[in-house]
Image: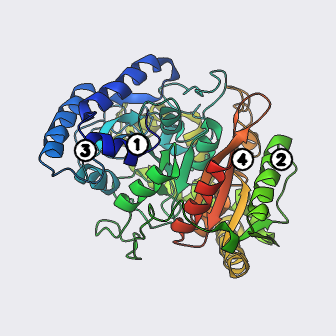
Amino acid sequence: MYNDYAELRNELVAGKVSCRDIVEFYLGNIEKGKHLNAFLLVFNDEALKRADEIDAKMKAGKAGRLAGMVIAVKDVLSLKGYTLTCSSKILKNFEALYTATAIQRLLDEDAIIIGKTNCDEFAMGSSNENSAYGNVLNPHDNSRVPGGSSGGSAAAVAADMCMVSLGTDTGGSIRQPAAFCGVAGLKPTYGRISRYGLTAFASSFDSIGPFAKNIHDAALVLEVMAGKDKNDSTSTDHSVDNYSAELDDFDVSKMKVGIISDLDESGLQAEIKLSMNKTIEKLRAKGAEIIPVELPYLKYSIQAYYILTTAEASSNLARYDGARYGVRAKDSAVLEDMYVNSRTEGFGTEVKRRIMLGTYVLSHGYYDAYYKKAQKVRRLIKEDFRYAFTKVDLILAPTTPTTAFRIGEKTSDPLEMYLNDIYTTSSNLSGNPALSVPAGKDESGLPIGLQIIGREFDEAGILRLGNFIMKNS
Ligand code: GLN
């Protein structure tokens, strides 16, 4: 086992270990952890073959920056020639026609993709209980959820089935499972990583990002994936920082760290609050300035998020009609029946609920009352953050109100499930980058996650503070 990729790289260069050894190690763990149901697809032979190719490149001194880094990707991302199910029935047999830019950039640097991970159907959920291919179990306690929607990706890193994984975050789907599984999970600034090849849920919210056991690896992978892509007009040409440098020697004493004074803490587990307080004390002891900031519109995040994302989802998911993608219902008499039957059979309950909610908030007579109003709230939340960041460099908050809950505990009450995203949705509404890092455990031994939110494009800042917190908790 290695602390991070840099350490492994040294061993690879010295010839003490090969890419084949590494792939075999992870394949062994995937086999051992089969009951977790983290993977929908495992690339056994392909990964070993690629490992041999990269070993040869390594010997020739021509290996890329991520040579031998074993990565799993959430099954909402396209990888040419392989199924792209989005954990849905409707796309059960759909094969990707091209490779997502984020994955292509990893491949170009000689990373090895080991498989595709389970998630909530079309990335809608907070517990991975909405997958058409079954639950994912939390590696820390198999009776609990791993979080969602990128539950398989978080569990895979936590259970050492890969070194790094990719997830997507529309309202918390990287940070919340990272918190539940005790790993680091980064949602970059909106537009930082190209969405080309990511199946859209809510296009103006969706972000791709990494899970890792340490900040160095997350930073390195971000560095490789970030940057403008001509295939995604919302990707930005804002310069890509050297995220993986200066992580350890950074000076906390110069930091102004904000804590949200008007945060809704009514459902916050005491041990998470305690972990926050301990972290604040450690930062203070190192000389950081802790400054309370108010974000008055944050309390409307959940409402605005579920109005706007369901609206976008209802439009994005209109394309799955049985005619163009995936599963088509049999024996429909007329065209319209074919559409209706394919969607009725192909979509799960939660996805249907979101399509209906989204269609409702966009419909004549309700558009102004819901959709337009929520857009205004989105702007106000964005301004709240802008103003707060004139006073502080970074904001520290809990990632989730509780640690991992039990499988089945919240499935009968969608609202209760949605409230899990209370601390994460705001930075998707605003576009700010946010990172969840492990910060201790609760009394049942379940991981606690703390969240660091940064100014737009200040991934470097949140990664540095995240590294400090991980090393000091
Ligand atoms: N849990 C949130 C939802 O269900 C977030 C999903 C996500 O980030 N993809 O919408």
**42 to 123, vertically: above or below:** above
Along the line of sight, the residue nearer the viewer: 9 or 260 = 9
- Under circle 4, the secondary element is loop
Residue 148: quarter of image = top right
Q: Which residue is drawn at 64% across and 63% down?
A: 453
**Residue with the mark numbered 2:** 274
Q: What residue is shown with label 1?
A: 336
Which comes before the other along the chain, label 1 or label 2? Answer: 2
Which one is closest to the eye, mark 4 or mark 3?
A: 3
Residue labelled 4 has its Cβ within 8 Å of some atom of ligand 1: no
Chain-order first, disc 1 or disc 3: 3
Q: Residue at x 64, y 38 (%)?
A: 180
Q: Does the residue labelled 2 lie within 8 Å of ligand 1?
A: no
- With respect to residue 179, does 283 lie above or below? below
Cα distance between the residues tagged 4 and 3: 40 Å
The residue labelled by disc 4 is: 400
Is residue 78 among the parts visible in the rendering? yes
Q: State if disc 3 and disc 4 touch (CB < 8 Å).
A: no
